Amino acid sequence: MLQKIYDWVDERVDITPLWRDIADHEVPEHVNPAHHFSAFVYCFGGLTFFVTVIQILSGMFLTMYYVPDIENAWESVYYLQREVAYGQIVRGMHHWGASLVIVMLFLHTLRVFFQGAYKKPRELNWIVGVLLFFVMLGLGFTGYLLPWDNKAYFATQVGLEIAAATPIIGDSIRSLLAGDPTIVGAQTLTRFFAIHVFFLPAALFGLMGAHFVLIRKQGISGPL
Amino acid sequence: MSDKQRVSRRQFLNYTLTGVGGFMAAGMLAPMVRFAIDPVLKPSAAGDFQSVASVDEITNEPQRFEWIVEQVDGWYESEVQKTAWVYRTEDDEIVALSPICTHLGCTVDWASQEEYPDQFYCPCHAGRYTKDGVNVPGTPPTAPLPLFDHKVEEGMLYLGQAQDR
C-alpha cells in the first residue's frame, strides 16, 4: 500500500533522487567510528541537531498549555507539569534538552576548532556556526524567563543589566529587549515569548539550512 | 536454513536501523502525543448541586433563576453564572429547563413574543418551545431544551448538570 503510494508519486515527480542523494552519500573512513573509534568526535554536530529536533517538538507541544502572561504563565506551567499526563516528561525534555544542546554545540565547536576544520575554504561555515551558537544562547536566555518564577525573573533582570552595560546604546537595548525602560513585567514576558518561539527559531532554521548546504557542498574536512 | 530465506546483510541492516529508529522516534513522540490528547482522556468532573432558590418562590409560571458556579478551567478558576427557567407543573413536579437553544446555542426567553405567550422563544432564528421545553415542529430547533438535574432539600431547590433529552 505504502509502496504503491510512493511509486505513484515517484512516477510523477521523481522524488527518489532527493533522498537517494542523502542516503547514498558516503561517510569517509576517517569520520566513521566503526573504523576508528576516535571518530566519535564527529558525532557532536549530529547530536546537536538531534537534540534541537527534540527541543522543537517538545516546545511545540508545550505551547498547547503555556500562556505568556504574567498572571497565568506560572500557573499554566504548574498545571501542565502537575495535572496533564506526561507533562513532567515533556517539560523535562525541553528543560534538560536546553542545557544538553549547549553542551553538544560546545563539543562540536571544540572539535572543529582543535582539528582546524574551520580553515579555508570552510571559514564561511564557521561564521554560520558562530551565528548558530548566538541564536542558541538567545533561545536559552529568552526561554529561561518563560516559567515566570523567581529564578527566571532575576536571571532576566541580570541579563538585562548586562545588555544595559553596552556603551552609549545600552539603555536602548535594554528597553528594546524588556519592552520598558525600568519594569521587567508583562511586556517583557510577551516579547521574550515572541522572540523565543518565532524570531529565533526562524533564524535558527535559516542558519541550519545554510550550515548543512555548505557542509554538503564543501565536504567534510580531511583526516588530521 | 535454505538460501532462499537468508536475510542479506543489507536487509538485516535496514530492518535493524528502521527498528531502532522507529523505537527512538516512538519513545520521543509517545509522551508528547499523550500530553497533547490529555483533554480528551480526562474524566469530566461531575457537577455539584447548587442551591438556586427557595421552593416557595416557584410558581406555575416559568421564572428565570440565576446562580453562580465555581468553574475550574485548567489553571484558571472563575465564577460562572448559570441560568434556568423553573416552574411547577399541575402535578406539583418541579421542572428546571436550560435556556440554551438546541438550534445554535442562543438564549431563549419565556413569553417574550406577543403571538406566543405560553412558549419559549429564541430571538436568533425564531425557534420556539412549548412550556415543557419540547421544540415546536417547523421551527429551527431539532431537540427539546435540556433539563437540569434537581433536588429539593430543606425547602431549597438545588440544580445540577443540564441533561440533553
Image (cartoon, coloured by chain):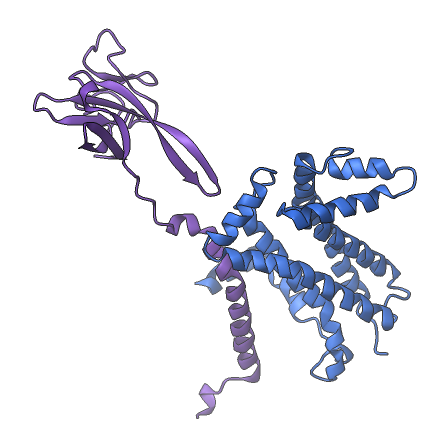
Chain colours: A blue, B purple
Q: Locate the C terminus of chain A by quadrant.
A: bottom right
Percent x, y of residue A54: 61, 59
Residue placed most toward the observer, B84 or A200: B84
**Left or right: B129 in relation to B20:** left
Q: Position of residue A221 (x, y in %)?
A: 83, 71
| Residue that sits furthest to the front in the current view | B154
Q: Position of residue B163 (x, y in %)?
A: 24, 35
Q: Residue at x 88, y 43 (%)?
A: A166
Image position of A31 with respect to A182: above or below: below
| Picture layout, residue A84 above or below residue B134 | below
**Residue A212 placement (x, y as % from top left):** 74, 60
Residue in the image at 33% along x and 22% along y: B107
Left or right of A96 on screen, residue A127: right
Work out which quarter of the rendered image holds the N terminus of chain A and state it. bottom left
User: Viewer-proximal residue, B50 or B88?
Assistant: B50
- Residue at the far left: name it: B91
